Amino acid sequence: MSASEVPNSTEKSKQENPVLRLVLDLGPLLLFFGVNAYFGIFAATAIFMVAIIVALVVSRMLTGQFAKMPLVTAVFVMVFGGLTLYLQDETFIKIKPTIIYLLFAGILLGGLAVKRVFLRSLLGEAFDLDDAGWRKLTYRWAWFFVFLAGLNEVVWRSFSTDIWVSFKVFGLVPLTLVFAAFQVGLLQKHARSTD
């Protein structure tokens, strides 16, 4: 992060409206699905790349900073989307989720191996958990990412491109939301008591 991206210590970082955050996260995926249905995977990939950049820029304008995970995702979309378009090979856009999920899992598990809990730096403002809670939550998310990577591989290798696109939009997102909902018990159990 460059000095220009660090919020001024005298002013609070602006918070994004949750509804707008949802639109910025889901909008590019929905465009990807819609364009694929009418114009195919290559046009959908091009639109997806543009939409991801627009969402990132809008988020930066509203909050004054780039969110880490969307920024990493955008980089991967540009690289794998670019390869898909340049080589006219849809395999690259299909393996992108696998690589991103394995990267996130590797970062989380690697952090735990060196006694660092990277999930805390991402979610620490939203949740105040004890150390055991952060470790358990990190393990759960890491293994969930491994599961999603495997599931993505099975779907793109076994089904048509249209089915894979539908799965990416209407399968991976709901699965992630359901998994997150199942973490509420852990969050409550390990929440630090506040004064």
Image: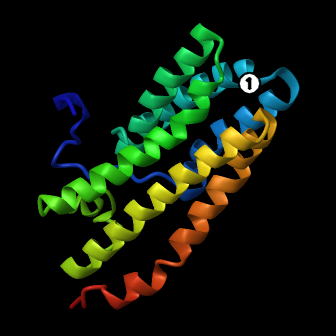
| For residue 177, above or below residue 98 | below
Residue 173 occupies which quadrant of the picture? bottom right
Q: Residue at x 73, y 43 (%)?
A: 158
Q: Whole-percent x and y of residue 72?
A: 39, 37
Residue 128 seen by the camera: no
Q: Quadrant of the C terminus?
A: bottom left
Q: What residue is shown at x 60% (from left), y 53% (from top)? A: 151
Q: Is residue 166 left or right of residue 103?
A: right
Left or right of 6: which side holds 58?
right
State left or right for residue 4 relative to residue 20: left
What crowding class fits label 1: few (fewer than 14 Cα within 10 Å), some (14-19), or many (20 or more)?
many
Determine whether the residue tagged by mark 1 lies in a helix, strand or loop.
helix
Residue 59 screen position, x and y as percent: 47, 39
Quadrant of residue 35 within the rendered picture = top right
Q: Amino acid at mark 1?
A: Ile
Q: Tell me which residue sits at (71%, 18%) in the image.
A: 42
Residue ranking furthest to the top = 86
Residue of label 1: 41
